[in-house]
Amino acid sequence: MTPNNVKLCMGCMNPLPEGEDKCPHCGYQEGMPYSMTYLRPGTVLKERYLIGKVADKNSEGATYIAYDQTEDKKVLVREFMPEQIAERNESNQCIRPKAGYERQFKTALSDFVELSRQLLALNKISGIVPVLDRFVDNDTVYVVYRFLRTLKLSDFLQRNGGELTWSQTKKMFLPLLNTLSQLHKKGILHRGISPETIWVDQDNKLWLAGFCIADTRTEGGDVGAALFEGYAAPEQYSLSSWQGTWTDVYGISAVLYRTLTGTRPADGNSRRISDDLCPPNELNRKIPANISDAIFTGMIVPNEKRVQNIDEFTGLLLEEGDTHTAIFESSKVNLEVKKKKNQSRKVRVAVWAMGITLLILLGVMFWVLYTLGIFDKKETSRPSQTISYLDEQSAATNSAISADGVPDFVGKDIDAIKNDPAYADRFEFIEKEGDYNEEYSKNIVYYQEPAKGTPMPNKGCVTLYVSKGSEMVPMPGLKGSTLEFATKTLTENELEYETVGIVDASAESGLVIRTVPAEGEMVSKKTGTVYLYIKEDSVSSSGSFNGDAVGVKDDNDDDDDE
């Protein structure tokens, strides 16, 4: 209960309608099962914070949706609960280290306390989710964050077709880059920058969330790693590698790669063994060359060759590609990219020189042999064989592209596609509800982007447009049924309806007297409306009747807190 004795949903902390135990906003139902590893929904901490369900968790701990009963507002509460080395006492909910892990727990808890202290001092830096409070309870530490109405960047990209243009991206990301620069100047590294830890608010402003201790963001640590595949830097996969500001440069570069191409980069660990990362502008030709070069340089595997800090990286992004005039002063030129370009240019010149020399030698040889009469002057070449060979080579190339490219998803069931393990590591699917389609049944893909066969060497986004099925359905027989049954049936058939009250002394209250259209007639899901005629007093008693007007189906327009 809140201070005003309003019952709250433990799933979203919105008020519950009186007498209801299932939330109309998020669907959470009172009494739903929960993991005993985490706090019981309804727990109150510090006699102030009402704890709801787990909103997010990793090897460091859990973040709960919560309610500040003193300030009368939603908050997020982060609990230090590293389940790999700790456990919860079910009787009093206190956290204790597992046997043999006392030292590791104490060290990790100390790091968590220090991180929370640093984050409390950052509230004046824009773009970082503010810390409001921290306290000790249940023999562990809690950090309270401000609740923001946001989407994760991953969800935001899905809602916007999978990728953004550079002009859109630049406007959103430059303030975040400035935030990162200020964060580094305070001596704090994030180490977990990804589309899951960057949030987008209603004004398209980006917020940095998901701060964790270093042990959580490094493979092989005591707490257990929580790394984001494709976005964690190569050095995060080894305890012996040195991490620094260049680690966050890699993370933000990888996020920009995903944002501009719609493709998740290959993971940093595998790139240490075999690096076949495609430059961004090879996946999206609309990306300016200097932007592609900057991102590619920010993702170089050896960290000593990578851009070393955010200011230098921002300078490369803002360098004008045509004039090479830096809008943002940068102290380091992209030596790695330029070196590769110079090497490539030298190789091309050498190849051309060798080719010309070879042609001259072949010409001289041919002239000598021709003069000696070795060639029959009337003999002709066999162009058909040459063409056949080229055709075979072309066919082999196209076959290879088709094998590595996007499969043909049209005509397949959307659930079967998304649940197929063969696709899980290669694609991220964006499901778009399409229009009604007479050719394809409901839940069947009728169009895809990109098209079949499009090369996609790294994990990328594929947008699938799903049919809503046939627009026309036969009107079900509802005469004599209860109004509740009739409206439920029409809703299940995706048909709009209105109720009409009529005066009929012989009719039974609450039952459908007749329908328009009649049973068996075809109705359009898109434009049709079904009229349910019932006895006037039953409409009035339900509050839907107004004179002889119609009562329209009630759509819940309440905004959900995301």
Image (cartoon, grey):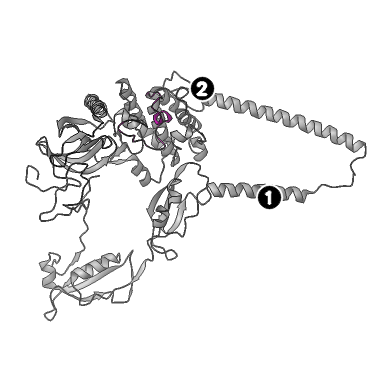
Quick one: which residue is furthest to the bottom in this view? 506
Q: Quadrant of the N terminus?
A: top left
Which numbered disc, 2 or 1, marks the residue that appears first in the sequence?
Answer: 2
Placement of 338 over or under 462, stated as above or below: above
Quick one: which residue is furthest to the top in this view? 331
Distance from disc 2 to disc 1, alpha carbons, whole Å, reads 41 Å
Q: Quadrant of residue 314?
A: top left
* Label 1: which secondary element: helix
Q: Which mark is residue 391?
A: 1
Label 2, on which residue? 335
Placement of 332 over or under 483, stated as above or below: above
Which residue type carries mark 2? Leu
* Side (left or right) of 151 relative to 288: left
Which residue type carries mark 1? Asp
Decide whether residue 17 is among the magenta residues: no
* Side (left or right) of 561 relative to 387: left
- Asked if residue 355 can be seen in this view, the reply is yes
* Side (left or right) of 211 relative to 483: right
What residue is rendered at 25% in x and 68% in y?
Answer: 489
What residue is rendered at 52% in x and 38% in y?
Answer: 282
- Asked if residue 284 can be seen in this view, the reply is no
Q: Which residues are magenta?
A: 222-244
What residue is rendered at 29% in x and 21% in y?
Answer: 186
